[in-house]
Amino acid sequence: MTSRAQDLLLGLVPLALVIALWQALVSFGYAPATLLPPPGMVFRRLAQQLTTLTFEQDIAATLFRLFAGFLIAVVLGVTIGIAAAASPLINSAVRPVVRVLAPLPKVALYPALLLLLGFGHESKITLVTADALFPILLSTYYGASTVEQKLVWSALAAGTSPREVLFKVVLPAAAPSILTGCRIGLVISCIVVFLAEMITSTDGLGHVLVTAARTFQAVDMFVPLITISLLGLILNAALGALRSYLLRGFPEV
Amino acid sequence: MRSRFISGTRAAPWLACLGLLVIWQIAALALKNDSFPTALAAIRAIPLILGDKEALINILASQRRMTIGFVVAIIVSIPLGLMMGRSRAVASFFNPLLMVIYPVPKAALMPIIMLWLGVGDLSKTLVIFLGVSLPVIYHSFEGAKSVEEKMLWSGAAMGLSAAERMVRIVLPAALPEILTGCRTGLVLALITMVTSEMIARQSGAGNILFNALDMGEYDLVFAMIIIIGAMGICLDAMFETLRRRLVRWSEPQFDMPLSFS
Amino acid sequence: MRAPAQATAMIEIDHVSQTFQTSARQDHLALSDISLTVEDGAFVSILGPSGCGKSTLLYIVGGFVSPTQGAARMKGKAITGPGPDRGPVFQEFALFPWKTVLGNVMYGPRQQGVKAAEAEAQCRALIEMVGLKGFEDFYPKELSGGMKQRVALARTLAYHPEVLLMDEPFGALDAHTRTRLQNDLLNIWERDRKTVLFVTHSVEEAVFLSDKVVMMTRSPGRIREIIDIDLPRPRRRSELLLDPRYQKYVVDIERMFDDGGAQGGTL
């Protein structure tokens, strides 16, 4: 058996243990079914919900906000990051602002966003963008500013204009770092969109959770949590695959 | 160049703050929206919150929970991360479990945890513990993984046992990265605290924030935002000073962590 | 000078082979049936092109890597792991960045239970001997490459290993620093003539430093030839460079490497 397969099997053990423990807690009566429904019940409900239109619409709403916010964050983050790495002037303007804004819990801004943008998609997308922006920006800046000088010089010597160098050399060379930042940004987007929907929303996975909580439906509370976890895993894997494909020429990074 | 001089000084972040507040002030005056008070109005409302005894007690209680959750988390997470970093088997064992938990916002676990553990301090502290653990485990893992093999061999040649090498070589060598993880964890503790309070609506800073929102007291809303923001910045700055002191010996690192969530 | 006595082999390498699994999940034979004895007090160089497994051989003697076949022995006893009797000096220095120069050098003695005051005195003397007096409280990040390697050497000498295992220790340094350190190493070695296994890819370095040069082939590494270097000690670079015997050794060895290549052989 390959070591990769071995690793995977080993990793499934704690998951299996958790589910086994879960089932045991229910079967042996340590937890009433109202508080901790058995795993079988939860997964059946999940399967059922996945084919229900309203739930699918909720997933769609969540995904829409997630992607919109994430993509805007990518565009903004990469642009500003590269600009800051390329121009000392922009750098000196951006750096202190980022230093101040980055540690702020942006979710504290959420009420402000609600007031300004209403309770619909816009406020949530903006919050997602605000939270996902910084890791992407920082990793882009880091990647772009640590591009080996000799690479740039080689391209310039071959006749590339400085502006072209940004696209043809700096961007690809910074790609590993940028994609790492995007991965972090994507997970953050999952987390933030879910949270925003929990705090105030009329649809989306977060909203499903809160509704279930208010009506004490434990099973229905597990379903959106597992869904967002699966979504996160799938998106992460997809981005990982994209990363491997885009970086196939690079040395092991 | 003048611009480089300005950004190089320590005044730069303060200037940035000031700049942002100015932009806020101008934007608010321009928009003339009732629900968007000016920066000055918000600042003036701050003493109203801090002066209110009950609010202050609430905020301090939040911070207490946050601190406990944070400390317990790092005590558990650092050894786990280090072991994962040095042992492929341990890493393979825990990785998938952690990856499943990662995309779930820990504050979203609040309703379920409250269902099980009630509305007291325990559930909130538990959520904070979970939120802080992940980045600390991850960074400890990365730090331990990148410890130079030859350093460990040198230690083995000197007679150190495997356990001694873990504590006396891996731990100090990985310390810069571990502390970066702790810095992320600290900010996350604050975020998790605030969001769990926004969701649970029982007490604490997040609750004050949304109460003000519900009651239409927009000055207070924004004042609270400033207070929470200031807490975040202060904690981060304090920790960074501590970190720099502890790892004076390390090569200069990229000075901002890449992830806050 | 050591009394000859019975020629006790300090290190015996007995039909050692080493196979690695590469990432492509293929087997790579790094070392093939290496047998070698190293006498007490001998300075032996292991010379070969990159990838011939010479470092791996050193790591096997050091106990950091287990041979897939065969065994290495020290003074008759099988080598099963690392220990203070075989002290390594690595090309990457491997200093502990969180400790000062003095802290690094004192590490081994303290580990062996030497009392702090005594250890400090010994180590300060050692630091002076490697030419770093005044730098005891500096951190590794504040030192140049050459200085770091001096610290690494002092750190290993501090716990008095019987055998020094040096893995291309001057490979990461510029030519000028390299020649200085080669001289300093010989001066230090002359004092108590420890057994040294010195891995290098530089013919001149091997001939200059050693009593014996073990020439290795390209991967899979085999011993091609063992050459005794019969040059008087102490060796001065300025004299040796002009000495026709030294020059002949260098030319002969280089020719042997070239020939092997020209014949399309395994060299």
Image (cartoon, rainbow, N blue to C red):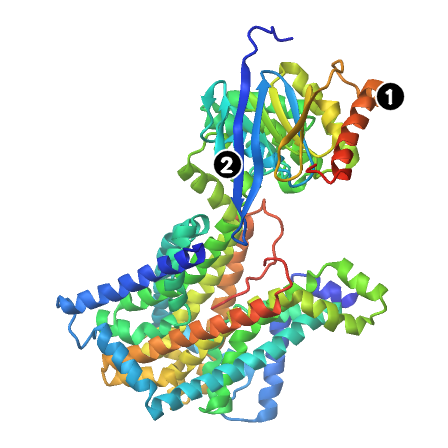
Secondary-structure class at tag 1: loop
Q: Residue B81, can we see it?
A: yes
Name the amino acid type tagged 2. Val
The residue depicted at 47 percent of the width and 89 percent of the height is A121
Quadrant showing the N terminus of chain C: top right
Estimate how packed mark 2 is, as few (under 14), some (14 to 19) or many (20 or more) residues with alpha carbons within 10 Å.
some
Disc 1 to disc 2: CB gap under 8 Å: no
User: Disc 1 designates what residue?
Assistant: C242
Q: Which sits in the foreground, C20 or C40?
A: C20
Q: Position of residue C66 (x, y in %)?
A: 48, 35
Of all residues, the one furthest to the left in this rendering is A29
Relative image position of residue C195 (x, y in whole percent): 60, 20
Q: Could you tell whether B98 is left or right of A142 in the image?
A: left
Is the residue at mark 1 from the same chain as the one at mark 2?
yes
Circle 1 crowding by C-alpha within 10 Å: few under 14, some 14–19, many from 20:
few
Q: Image check: B94 left or right of B237? A: left
- SS class of the residue under badge 2? loop
Kindly identify which residue carries mark 2.
Answer: C65
Quarter of the picture containing the C terminus of chain C is top right
Query: Mark 1 — on which chain does it sit?
Result: C
- Can residue B60 be seen here? no
Amino acid under label 1? Leu
Return the x and y of residue C217 as percentages of the image width and height. 67, 35
Identify which residue is drawn at 57% across, 88% down: B28
